[in-house]
Amino acid sequence: MEVDTATSATQAPAKHSLPEVEIYGYLLVLIYLIDQKRYSEAKACSSASIARLKNFNRRTVDVLVSRLFKLRTYW
């Protein structure tokens, strides 16, 4: 039996990540932008994250969502 290890090592990453990881990424970027005082970009990031949240209906992202909404009221 022949096994091609080159193709298994170079497989493309999954197209869909976990919603929790995606929202956490948005949260990290948003905190960074606020720390850098780039408020217009932070507002755009916040709007994009909230628009993306409408696609998720999972209780596991509720804590992260609450942080996003709290940061959105920052400015």
Image: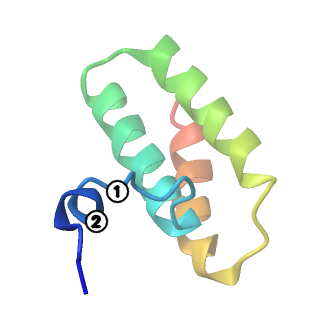
The image quadrant of residue 72 is: top right
Q: Is residue 62 left or right of residue 30?
A: right
Q: Position of residue 25 (x, y in %)?
A: 40, 50
Q: In which quarter of the image is the N terminus?
A: bottom left
Task: Please give the residue where the numbered disc 2 appears in the rendered image.
Answer: 8
Q: Along the line of sight, which residue is nearer the eye, 23 or 35? A: 23
Task: Please give the residue where the numbered disc 1 appears in the rendered image.
Answer: 11
Q: Along the line of sight, which residue is nearer the eye, 24 or 74? A: 24
Q: Where is residue 14 in the image (x, y as percent from the top left)?
A: 48, 59
Q: In this view, does 28 lie to the left or right of 14?
A: left
Badges 1 and 2: C-beta atoms under 8 Å apart? yes
Q: Is residue 25 left or right of residue 67?
A: left
Circle 1 Cα neighbour tier, 10 Å, few/some/many (<14 / 14–19 / ≥20) = few
Amino acid on which the number 1 mark rests in the picture: Gln
Which residue corresponds to the image point at 61% horizontal and 61% vertical from the top-left? Answer: 65
Q: Along the line of sight, which residue is nearer the eye, 70 or 28? A: 28
Amino acid on which the number 2 mark rests in the picture: Ser
Compute the Cα span from label 1 to label 2: 6 Å
Q: In this view, does 49 lie to the left or right of 53?
A: left
Q: List the single residue furthest toward the front.
A: 1
Q: Which label belongs to residue 45?
A: none
Q: Can residue 50 be seen in this view?
A: yes
Which residue corresponds to the image point at 18% horizontal and 67% vertical from the top-left? Answer: 5
